[in-house]
Image: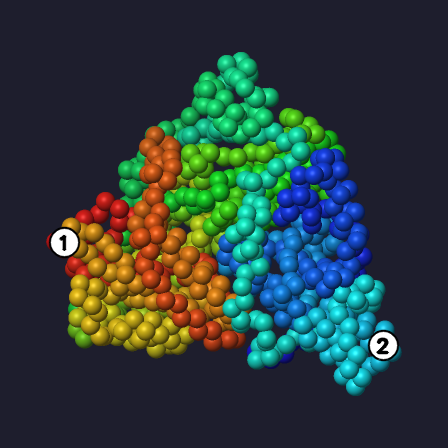
Amino acid sequence: MKKEIINVSRRDFLITTGKAGAGMSLGFYLSGCRENISNEAPTSLMAAATEKLAQVPEVNAWVVIQPDDTVIIRIARSEMGQGTLTGLAQMVAEELECDWSKVTTEYPTPGQNIARDNVWRDFATGGSFGIRGSHQYVRKGGAVARHMLLEAAAEQWGVEMAECKVANSVITHVPSGRTITYGNVAAAAAELFPPEQIELKDPKDWQLIGKPVHRLDTDDKLNGKQIFAADLTLPDMLNASIKACPVFGGKLKTFDETKVSNMPGVRKVVAVHDDAVAVVADTWWQAKKALDALPITWSKGPNTNVNSASIDKMLDEGLTSKENVFVGNQIGDVSKALEGAAKVVEATYRYPFQNHATMEPMNATALWTKDKCEVWCPTQNGTASLHAAADAAGLPVSQCDVYKIHLGGGFGRRGAFQDYVKQVVAIAKQLPGIPVKLLWTREEDMAHGHYHPITKCKMRGGLDDKGNLTGLHVRISGQSILAAVNPGWMTNGADMFTFQGMLPKGDHSISYTVPNLLVDHAMRNPPVPPGFWRGVNINQNAIYMESFIDELAHAAGKDPLTFRQKLMVKHPEGLAVLNAVAEQAGWGKPAEKGVYRGLSVCKAFASHIAACAEVSVNEKGKLKIHRIVAATDPGYAVNPQQIEAQVEGSFVYGLSALLYGECTIKDGAVEQSNFHDYGSMRINEMPKVEVIVMPSGGFWGGVGEPTIAVAAPAVLNAIFAATGKRIRHFPLQGTNLLAS
């Protein structure tokens, strides 16, 4: 990748170098600092923020430098444990050439972004897009600020800018040896015009990008200073607990507030939209106890007839149907190839509904008046939260704002779905001028998620007399996320997200070359709301494809690695990560006694990933996952240590889904209610994870979402190697793993 020359228009200049306080008066000091939240009366929160902000010497929208050389980098994306704040700050700091030890971050607000003509661009964080979708313009922000600081120093000294250089926030005039720090020229730099063109560094010259620097948020999380939305307190704040109709599509019929109005701390009982009721009290526990005692009747509607068995029947019909079927990838003539095959292998897999189960349940805090609505919330999409708040408030967007707070888990739940924001505003609107914090119970969170879509998949593969794969038909039957969430993103009625990891080209292309291929989707949508769930459809698609490729290899009498390698000759990046895990895991060499290995590989979110798992199954059928070797090629690796942590974390999430994750439906409602019946991995179950980060350059791929996909199929293939038994329905909990 060569150096990039970035043009900066006058319009960009006017946007990026507006003086502090001009269209920037909200929220920078409200999202992460306890003292700046709790010590002001609600009506003076904006005034306090404005006063503090006006004292900040902003160089441009991305970079604020204080007199003591503290560098504040403004990040629009959301931090939910994945390290986005640190990664994006590294990219700005790389071009800024500042002292990393003095870097901190803050969130701008979506309201400020609109007021400044979208200077910070995208406030959404999902699809592993936080870094790969903003790397260019955030680096530009740092490069422009560096140029302006150098220019300000040169003007102050009366020398040529070309005679000056910078390192670690110190500008040096090379001929004379004079030095000055960024903090001493920041105010002057803010007065200058930015350059019309700016040159970004060549990747070979990066000093900070690519280094495993420590995360910027670790200390505050360890010492308890970090505020999550559930921790937030405001003066005179009330607390709300909510309950919606447990049946999907049901409505609120009646409730009798007189039965709880005299309970301790209760302030008000309110209907929320047409499907929920909330109790507002002095403390959350008082609100929750009153809600538990509140007599409520529901109008449950027709979905009480829906259950897991009826949904399975719907999906089974789609496996062979010719109705409402969409093609995602087609090469050659699959029917003819299967008819002429020496051997046909067939298998059907099933993947269940799953809840996001974030450790922090849905919550938000709102303050509503007839002229203004403010919301403090954990959100993956600040802009969506802002519009949801404005809609619920009945106010123009210009009279609303959202203060983003660190998320206690997101996984897609807090992106497109802003139900909790709409609810808290609807409640606060009934108590004008009083801040109200809404916190869902875990049971409410389980009952009213937007679930990982349920699908079944029928796989048919044809082998010739030499064991070569000649034809493959993949029929997916099940939900479309886009049909429920954003039909405008669909293509001629098809949800192309359904085919992640199986598409002919692009970020989610298939990793194999098959001469005759058909991948299609029988869209079947039960009334259980689907949603984007970390990794989205690559989770089940990788299991389907990688488990079945393993089945084909064994049916052909071929080694699973050799079988894959032959199909991946035209996919060198994927082949490279597969070979890397095989080599490090010792594929082809004996494992320790009783331990067996399995492989998987795929491409998702533009990255290439592979895994080799080592497992054992004892005489009682108990599974132990000993080790997983993983490799990822994300193109560029901003922070290798964070990538390793993301891989490890994604394996916890993905393996929890494989082992325990299932939401079953009875009478139109989710049966699971808490972690006792919707489990996750315990620390003693976690395998050793070895991560190979092997960036090849030339593209920007994701990390947190693609890596989740390879752990489960690698483990499943290793289970087969250990037991001779194929597991095709999930989760594994309750499954007899012993060999037949």
Image quadrant where residue 467 sits:
bottom left
From the viewer's side, name the closer residue of 170 and 520.
170
Q: Residues within 10 Å of mark 1 (few under 14, many from 20)?
A: few
Residue at point 54% right, 40% down? Answer: 230
Q: CA distance from mark 2 to mark 1?
A: 79 Å
Say what amino acid the circle numbered 1 marks. Glu
Residue at x-position 65% and y-position 26% = 431
Q: How is the image coloured?
A: rainbow
Q: Dots 2 and 1: beta carbons under 8 Å?
A: no
Quickly name the residue at label 1.
Answer: 619
With respect to residue 238, does 455 lie above or below? Answer: below
- Image mark for residue 157: 2
Residue 149, horizontal then vertical, whole percent: 77, 70
- The kind of residue tagged 2 is Trp
Q: Report the residue that reaches farthest toward the bottom.
A: 175
Residue 638 place in picture, x, y as percent: 53, 68
User: Between 674 and 603, which is closer to the camera in this rendering?
Assistant: 674
**Residue 655 seen anywhere in this rendered image of the structure:** yes
Say above or below: 48 vs 169. above
| Figure check: 365 above or below 620 | above
Q: Which residue is rendered at x = 58% and y = 59% of the image?
A: 216
Compared across the picture, whether 323 is left or right of 179 comes to left
Res. 603 mark: none
Residue 217: quadrant of the picture: bottom right
Residue drawn 69% across and 48% down?
29
Q: Where is residue 90 shown, x and y percent of the image?
A: 60, 66
Between 178 and 459, the residue placed more toward the observer is 178
- Residue 381 vertical placement versus 250 (above, below): below
Neighbor class of circle 2 (other Cα within 10 Å; few <14, some 14-19, many 20+) is some
From the viewer's perspective, tell me whether residue 545 is left or right of residue 120: left
- Relative horizontal placement of residue 563, taking residue 369 as reference (left or right): left
Secondary structure beneath dot 2 equals: helix
